[in-house]
Amino acid sequence: MLTVNFSSVLPEIVVLCGACVILIADLFLSEARRHVSFWLTQIVLAAAAWGALATMQVLPATAFSGMVVDDMLADTLKFMTCVSVSLVLFYSRGYCAARGLFRGETFVLTLFALLGMMVMIAAGSFVTLYLGLELLALSLYAMVAMYRTSNVASEAAMKYFVLGALASGMLLYGMSMIYGATGSLDIAVVAKVLAAGQGNKTILLFGLVFVVSGVAFKLGAVPYHMWVPDVYDGAPTAVTLLIGTAPKLAAYAFMLRLLGVALGSLWFDWQGMLIVLAVLSMVLGNVVAIAQTSIKRMLAYSSIANMGFLLMGFLAANPNGYSAAMFYAIAYVLTSLASFGMVMLLSREGFEADQLEDFKGLNQRSPWWAFMMLLTMFSLAGIPPTVGFYAKFTVIQAAVDAGFVWLAVVAVMASLVGAFYYLRVVKLMYFDDATDTAPIAARADNRALLSANGLALLLFGMLPQPLLGVCVVALAHSGLL
């Protein structure tokens, strides 16, 4: 019989109902009253975040006959994705209004993307993992193409859709092979079958290759990275901000459920694949970023390199590595929110601040925002005392503890290469003369949140233990450590 536990999916129910209400309510709102849809979306996000905390419990629970898992890890990541999406909408408010994107479709698609993330995070079956992934992907495809007057955005959406469909097919094929070898789609059952040494080894390994390839594409890891720079650069910056932040938390949960739990017994086989992906991503991402003149493309290659560091935590294949990877994912999302938030802060109607030259002399225009951007670049580069330094330190330490000293050396060298193009932005802000002297205009709430976001990078860098403790506790009480 089907066991139903609606409290386990309370945040998902809130987001789904909220999206439907906003979709209908927006039909009756005039263009001048679009802010009503915006605030309704923020209320839904706040309610979903509260629901994630309210349903948090020490012992894991399942719902819908094991299709959904309600554990502390899921609730923690759901809360953080809600906060992340809320900040994305706040930072994007002025940018979208100036480009005709401040409308109900944007808010509804954002909520459906969030729903997909939540389904991925709480998945207890291959079916729910795949459904969540596709719901997220389809929402993002539409959002990239929403800027109808931009040929670049349309081209980026087409590339994203075609390559995303290919990766989804590979992932689905891999999951079907694993199902054929184990006889189950339930993550817990698959883990038990593999732990007992059952299942056709050859079919499992073929399925594993397809699964890792599909996951690597969704992360944007080399050599499945070809969509990242084009989509980051072609999409409206508000959509780029969404793509580059909250989905990374869902991707972390996706990898943990799939590789760390379901296929945990095959760690020796997928560990070698992740090593290759991590090395290629760190090296190629940092090297190619040096040649970029667009800050969005630079941050795209930075994302590729950072996913290489994230994979370092996973390839350790132990509790220390998984908690380090979770901490890294959260730190990266915080930093990306601030970086793209700064790009939109400097943009205005008819002007996109998407070139490195647009940051020249920023210290002359506003010392405070130059300092915020400096913290962001330091965090991405892994320079103390920002949170990015401690995040890189934890994943490198996890790799060293797992015996991959040579990989840690490669990671450090890649970080040194990456420091060049991050510090180039700092040099432009503080040592070059400003080419744009227009005043920086932004809403008071946007300024306050972006400032708090930037200072959080400094705070968590100097006091990382509370955030790292949350990661360890969430994994431990989910039975994953």
Image: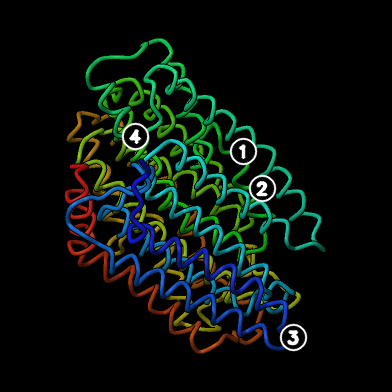
Q: Please, what secondary structure does the residue beneath circle 3 have? A: loop
Residue visible at 62% across and 64% down?
237
Q: Is residue 399 left or right of residue 218?
A: left
Q: Nearer the viewer, mark 1 or mark 4?
A: 4
Distance between the alpha carbons at the discs numbered 1 and 4: 30 Å
Q: Nearer the viewer, mark 4 or mark 2?
A: 4
Q: Is residue 263 above or below residue 229?
A: above
Residue of label 1: 226
Badges 4 and 2: C-beta atoms under 8 Å apart? no
Badges 3 and 4: C-beta atoms under 8 Å apart? no
Task: State the scheme by which the image is colored.
Answer: rainbow
Badges 2 and 1: C-beta atoms under 8 Å apart? yes
The disc placed on residue 230 is 2
Say whether disc 1 or disc 4 marks the residue closer to the N-terminus.
4
Residue visible at 56% across and 45% down?
134
Distance between the alpha carbons at the discs numbered 3 and 4: 47 Å
Say whether disc 2 or disc 3 marks the residue closer to the N-terminus.
3
Distance between the alpha carbons at the discs numbered 2 and 3: 34 Å
Q: Is residue 89 above or below residue 77?
A: below
Residue 55 position, x and y percent, is 28, 64
Report the amino acid beneath label 3.
Ser
Residue visible at 67% across and 63% down?
236
Say whether disc 3 or disc 1 marks the residue closer to the N-terminus.
3
Q: Please, what secondary structure does the residue beneath circle 1 have? A: loop
Distance between the alpha carbons at the discs numbered 3 and 1: 40 Å
Residue of label 3: 30
Distance between the alpha carbons at the discs numbered 4 and 2: 34 Å
Residue visible at 60% across and 57% down?
296
Residue of label 4: 187
Report the amino acid beneath label 4.
Ile
For the residue carrying disc 2, how many other residues have a C-alpha within 10 Å: few (<14), some (14-19), or many (20+)? many
